[in-house]
Amino acid sequence: MSVVTNAREMRYDCPYCKKEKGCCSLFFWAVRLTAEDYQSLVENGWCRCGRMIYFPINEKCCCPQHSMRIDAVKFRENSLQKKINSKIKRLQRGEWRPKIDFSSKTLMPFTSNDSKSKDSSFSLATPSAQSKVIGILGQDKGSQCIAQSNSDEVGIIPVQEAKKVLETKTNALSKEELEFKSAETTLNKLLKKVLSELKFDQIEMPTTFAPSRRRTKKRKNASSNFSNMFSTNAAFIVTSWLKRAKKAGLNDMKRDAKAEKRETQIDDLELKHVAMQITTGLEKGARSYPEIKSTVQFKVAGRGYINAYLPWLKGPVNGPVNKVTQNEKKKAKNVSLNPKMKLCISVKNAHFAEDVFKLYAMYQIKIHKDPIERITKQEFKAFLVDTPIVSSPSPRTWENIWPHNLGSSFRIYHLESSVRPLASPRLVGYALLDVLPSCLYSSYFVWHPEAKKLSLGVVSALEEIAIVKKLAEVEQNPNHLYYIGYYVHKNKQMQYKRQYTPSELYCPHAKKWVPFDEKSIKILEDNPHGPLVDLKQNEIVQKVDSKLDPLNHVMLLYRQSVIPYKNVKEQIDKVKPALRKELEVFAL
C-alpha cells in the first residue's frame, strides 16, 4: 500500500540555468510507495528527488524538461560507446592501465570531529603516518605543520610528529633506493666541482645529472648494454652561454639576417669540444669520490649530452629493450595477464557512508561548480539516500541477472590495484538506481573527477541497459525499458543523452511517448515549451460510461482506514470537490 500527500504546485530555482524561481512543478510527498505504483508514475512522466515525487510544468519553466527512456531490446551501441566498452575490457584483462593521479590536491570534504557542530560537513582531518608535510605554521617550539595524506586528507600536526613522519619515510626506503639517491647526489657534486674548475660556474641556469628515462636499444656491435644511466645537458648550456657572451661583446655593425642567424647557431665542433672538457674533468674527479666507485663511465652523446653509466647499481634506471619475435608475441597473447588495475562492481541498498558522501561533495564542487556551503550531509541524505519505495524481493527468474531486491540501490564502482594488494579499493563512482518490476530508472550518477579517463558514466549506462535487456529476454516481455531521467534541450550537459538510440520523450500535452528523432529535435528547437506532436492529429475521443467511473478502483487512506474511492465518493465530493481533479492526475 502506498501513502502520499496531496499534490500542489511549487516554484524553485532552476538547477540548469540557475534562474531564480525559474522552474515550476506539480509535486507531492510520498511516505510509502510500492514499486508497482512508482512504476505507473514513471510511465506517465513523473520522477522523484528523495521522497518528493514531481512532474515539471513545462509551460511555466524556463528550461522545459521531458522524461526520457530507452528501448533496451532495440538499443545498439555507436562507435564511441564501443570504444569505451573495449577500453574497459582491456583494463579488466590488464592490457591497459590508465594514468590516474588520486594524490592531486583536490578539495575534499571531511567529517567533523567536533560534537558541538553537528551541521558542519567540512573540517580538518588528522593525517596518518604516511602523510606528506606540505607547509609549516609558525617558527616557535609550538609551531605546527600542514600535512596531506595519500587519501587527499589535509590536517595540522605538530612539528615533532612531522619529523617522525619524515623519518618513517626515510627508513622505508630500500637499500637499492638509498644507493640510487646517494649516487645521484654524488654525481651532482662532482659536476658542480668540475664546472667551477673550468670557470663555468657563472652560468645562471642550473645543470644537474638526472636519471635518463629513455630506453637504450641493444645493438649487435655494442660491447656492453648499459642500463643504469644518468644524463646531463651541461655542455649544451655552457656552449649556449658562451655564444651569447661572445655576441654581446661584438661591435655594433650592420649585418644581414643570414649572418645574424649563423652567429646565434651553436657549432657542433664547439659543443663537442666543451663536452669533452667536462667529461675529462668528471673522469679525473670521480677518483676522489669512493661513493660512485671506479666503475663509473662517462660518455658524450648527441647534442652535447653527457651520460654517466653506473652498472653496479641494482634496480636499473631503465632496462634494455630486447627485440620480440612474432612467435613470442603469439605466446604472449595466449598467456593470461595479471591486471595491475581492476574495476570491481558491487550493489548495496541506498545508504549513507563517509566515502560515498565525500565523493558526492567532490563531484558537485568540481563538475557542477556548486558552492561548498550548499553541500551538507542533510542535503545529501534527502537527495540520494532517502527513498519512499518499499524494498521487496525480486522475481526468482532474475537470480542470475539481478539477485537483489526491488527498490532503490547504489551500484558502486571500486578500482582495485594488484600492485598494492593491502591498500583499500578506491571508490571511483556509483549510480542511484530504482529497480522496478518492468523497468529500471537511473536517477543519478556520481564519478571521481580524477577518473575521467574511465568514462564511468557511459560504462554505467551501457551495463544497466544490458541488464534490462537480459531481464526482458528472461521474462519474455518487450516492455522492459531503461529510464535515464529528464532531457533538457537547452542544457549542454544533457546532450550526451542523444547518443542512446532508439529512445523516446514523454509529451505532457498529448500524454504519450514520442520517438526522440530529428523531427522531435526540430520541434524542441522551434518551440521547446510546446507539444512534441500535432495535437489535432492525435486527438483520441474517450467515451466513458457514466455508470463506470475510472476512479472507483483507487484506494484512499480515509479516517485511518484504507477504502476504495467509490465508497466515500459522495462524502468527499461534498467536503472537498477539488480532490477529484487531483486523483485524476495520479490515477488516469
Image (tube, rainbow, N blue to C red):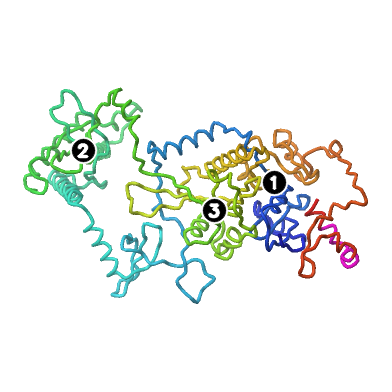
Question: Could you say which disc has been placed on residue 235 in the image?
Answer: 2
Residue at 34 percent of width and 63 percent of height = 128
Q: Nearer the viewer, residue 42 or 305?
A: 42
Q: SS for tag 3?
A: strand
Residue that carries the numbered disc 3 in the rendered image: 410
In the displayed structure image, the side of residue 152 where residue 484 appears, left or right: right
Question: Could you say which disc has been placed on residue 67 in the image?
Answer: 1
Q: Which residues are magenta?
A: 571-582
Residue 237: horizontal and vertical position, in percent?
25, 40
Image quadrant assignment for residue 532? top right
Q: Quadrant of the N terminus?
A: bottom right
- Furthest residue in direction bottom, as rendered: 116
Q: Amino acid at mark 1?
A: Ser
Q: Residues within 10 Å of mark 1 (few under 14, many from 20)?
A: many
In the displayed structure image, the side of residue 191 where residue 588 appears, left or right: right
Mark 3 and mark 1 lie on one chain; the one further toward the N terminus is 1
Q: Amino acid at mark 3?
A: Phe
Dots 3, 2 in contact, CB < 8 A: no
Q: Nearer the viewer, mark 3 or mark 2?
A: 3
Residue at 18 percent of width and 23 percent of height = 220
Q: Residues within 10 Å of mark 3 (few under 14, many from 20)?
A: many
In three-dimensional space, the C-alpha distance between marks 2 and 1, rounded to whole angstroms, equals: 67 Å
**Number of numbered discs on residues:** 3
Q: Main secondary structure of the magenta part?
A: helix
Magenta stretch holds residue 12: no
Q: SS for tag 1?
A: strand
In three-dimensional space, the C-alpha distance between marks 3 and 1, rounded to whole angstroms, equals: 21 Å
Q: Amino acid at mark 2?
A: Ala
